Image (cartoon, helix red, strand yellow):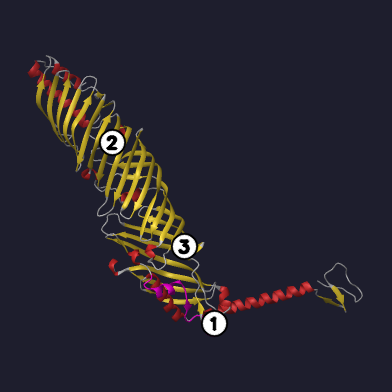
Amino acid sequence: MVLWAREDIAVAGDRWGVSGGAAVAPPDAERMRWLLGAAGALLVLVLAALAAVPWLVDTPRVQTYLAGAASQALGRPVKFASLSVSAFPVPAVRLRGLHVTEDPRFGGGPFLTVAEGRIRIKLLPLLSGRVELADVTLDGFVLSVVEDAGQWNVATLGPAAAAGRSAARGGPLPGAGSAAGGVAGIAALSRVQIVNGVVHLQRRHAAGGDVRLEGVNLTVAPAGRPDVLGATGEAVSRPGGVRLRLVDATVTPSAGRPMAEAAVKASIDVEADDVAPLAATVVASPRVAGALKGTVRVRGSLGRLQAEGELRTARLVLSQSPSRCPAPGPRELALEGVRLPLALAPGGLDAAPVQARASDGTVSFALSLRLAPSPLVVLQDITVKGVELKPILADYLCQPYAVSGPLDLAGVAVLDPGDPWRTLQGGGRFRVGRGQILGLAMLGLVNEAARIGTELAARALADRRSWSLDAPPDFESITGTYRIRDGVLSTQDLRYESRRLAGAAAGTYRLTDGRMDMAVTLTQGRSQVRARVSGAPDSVVIVPTGVTAGDAAGVRRILERLAR
């Protein structure tokens, strides 16, 4: 811009005046020039301070100090492979190869390793020649959490002595100060971040006790009060691929106490697209698949955490391929609206009541899972109402003695999830409403009974007619009580009721292969046929043990109606 002016001219309303033929800057312009000059000087000072950072810090002595302070704070030996100070892009201390030694009672491996740690240096104190540390970022973080005989390795964390506790919370930092050699202090770290870390959880001598949390991103910072830490984060469990999101978490250390006794409160959001990989670590068969969501609330101490919450799935599909089922492919059974209110403790979990809809009915029970010394599932208060049996016994399990009809049941059960049928223990009572006999073995049994009945009638009643099965026999109800021991079901009061015939049975049935040994009585009016039924489904042997004829044609009618 060019200013044309004369000595006797002043431009009204303009910021510039004319004096002696030269432009004169008003006071605002002078202030602007001063501010620009001050900003430039400050920038030069900041750059000079940044450039001087490596000379302001005596790195060997700082490395020794930090290792000692961390060792005293954790109660474990801590060492670094190297420590360096960088000025750009922000002033920071860089630690490489951090290693925290494990408690010897839990093995010789490391408790914690960190590939690289970055500790930011506060800028404003640096301008006055003091070195103060701010937040920490840890990359390549790998933590090993171990439980052995009810003891956790984190329970022994904590300051070794009062002096150690003082040093861990902050104090004079030797070898860091002004260029003149003054000593500065370390301020408490304002934030700790873990980026893409790994937490390895091991429960020794417990099946399914090896879990890894991968992709751990965690931020810990003061939460309103200086003695309370807040935390947020996320991780993915392996096996299982279950996504965990930590929200509203607080950790409150106790003065003079080990870190394992710090009080913890947290809420964890749980989500999985498919629970199959996780379920496979607990249950060998059937395969369990379906999406899962829920929230778990955690409380207690770091050394002894407890949790409660609820997991939900809209649809859970059980699938298996029993050898007795004809092709094609695996058989599936769907559970709808599954709700799992749970409480977790170090030894396992409890869930009550577990609820689901299955095959037009409802199922509920109280579940306890114990992990040590081996997995054990306890089911109590089992209540089944109106569950149609055909899709379960005939279509899914291909049971040789399958029936249709709505099931009502109450009972208890205990089993090893790795081998449920062979280890099942329990008992209860049941009632099956109106239905049909469907299982091939049962149909064959009826045909065989009709054949033997023909021979009996021919001898006892001079009736040489034979009967064949034209349709599955209908019944009004099947009721009884039962006991199960090592996968073998026994009953003394099984009752079969149809419109024409009544039956009773007492004996055993093996769940693994369908082998039975039953004393059977068929009754119509005053007439009875008694027999011993035993063997596997494809080789049942029927041995008649008695006939009571209430009238001349009583036995014939029993056998005829049995085969209808």
| Kind of residue sitting beneath label 3 | Leu
Q: Quadrant of the N terminus?
A: bottom right
Q: Which residue is mark 3?
A: 229
Secondary structure beneath dot 2 equals: strand
Q: Residue at x 29, y 43 (%)?
A: 379
Residue closest to the far top: 552
Residue 252 in the image: state x and y as whole percent: 44, 62
Secondary structure of the residue carrying tag 3 is strand
Look at the image and tell me whether residue 334 can be seen: yes
Residue toward you, 262 or 83: 262
**Rounded to the nearest whole Å, what is the CA distance between mark 2 and mark 3?**
48 Å
Task: Estimate how packed mark 2 is, as few (under 14), some (14 to 19) or many (20 or more) residues with alpha carbons within 10 Å.
Answer: some
Coordinates of residue 337 in the picture (x, y in percent): 40, 39
Residue 519 point in image, percent of width and height: 14, 30
- The question of residue 79 being in magenta is answered with no
Q: Nearer the viewer, mark 3 or mark 1?
A: 3
Which amino acid does the dot numbered 1 rest on? Ser
What residue is disc 2 on?
A: 410
Q: Earlier in the sequence, mark 3 or mark 1?
A: 1
Q: Residues within 10 Å of mark 1 (few under 14, many from 20)?
A: some
Residue found 53% across the figure and 76% down from its top: 87
27 left or right of 169?
Answer: right
CA separation in Å, label 1 and label 2:
79 Å
Q: Quadrant of residue 214?
A: bottom left
Residue corresponding to mark 1: 178
